[in-house]
Image: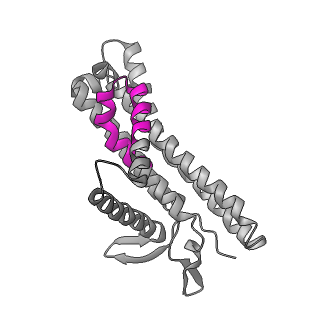
Amino acid sequence: MEEISLKAQQLFSIGSFSITNGLLLALLASLVLIIFSFVFKSKIKMVPGKVQGVVEMGIEALLGLMSSVLGTREAAEKYLPLIATIFIFILTSNWLGILPGVGSFVFERGNESVALLRSPAADLNFTLALAIVAVVTTNFFGIVVLGIFAHTKKFLNFSSPVNFFVGILELLSELSRIVSFSFRLFGNVFAGEVLLIIIFFLLPYVAPVPFLMLEMFVGAIQAFIFAMLTLVFLASHTAHAEH
């Protein structure tokens, strides 16, 4: 049975920077998306084919959902790259992480068996980095739209003791989003990874197939939830100007 490790395992290091199996698969997911984007761009036509049609339908559906949250189509188109990138990157990482055989490529290092690839979101460092990017970026757009003084006034308001206390609560709430973001995604993906390892060990071949389908669904849902929460927080930071 494959060893279950809570943290991503180091493969090698470049200077003081460690390359883990989770990071390697995240880089592979990035490469897959980059290649797909270049190939897709070269095949865009005025009369869309099947793949282009599906992509355009997905973009229109996402723009419609974003418009309902942000209030305007213009705002949705403005922030589409951020929300779509988060969703597609997490989705691709989750799905690549559960492909059959991903955890089968192992090598022996002393008494330890190290998997070459591992689901990136099963590493807390990955989900924490995504959470920080999401929270920092939404606050950055809040500063761009509202201005630095109007935005920071949400967190540091000295007009009255009550407003100051409310601002501190808002600041703590912003920091807690990083924790909730990272642990929600990490917990669900890591639990799914452990479940698949156990099922493959106990009931190989046919039995794992329904669980693979389930984990694909969970991976898509988690990517969608992460992207939508980012969208909601973005809307809360830019609401006054965009509306």
**Residue farthest to the right, as pictured:** 202
| Residue 117 colored in magenta in the image | no
Instruction: In the rendered view, tell whether residue 158 sits above or below residue 51.
Output: above
Instruction: Report the predominant secondary structure element of the magenta stretch.
Output: helix
Instruction: Indicate left or right for 82 with 217 as reference.
Output: left
Instruction: In the rendered view, tell whether residue 80 sits above or below residue 52.
Output: above
At 47% from the left and 58% from the top, the residue drawn is: 92
Q: Quadrant of the N terminus?
A: bottom right
Instruction: Indicate left or right for 126 with 189 as reference.
Output: left
Q: Is residue 232 visible?
A: no
Quarter occupied by residue 31: bottom left
What residue range appears in magenta? Answer: 59-87
At 67% from the left and 68% from the top, the residue drawn is: 197
Where is residue 68 shown, x and y percent of the image? 43, 25
Instruction: In the rendered view, tell whether residue 122 sits above or below residue 78.
Output: below
Where is residue 64 shown, x and y percent of the image? 42, 31
Instruction: In the rendered view, tell whether residue 202 sits above or below residue 230.
Output: below
Q: Nearer the viewer, residue 4 or 221?
A: 221
At 34% from the left and 22% from the top, the residue drawn is: 239
Quarter occupied by residue 143: top left
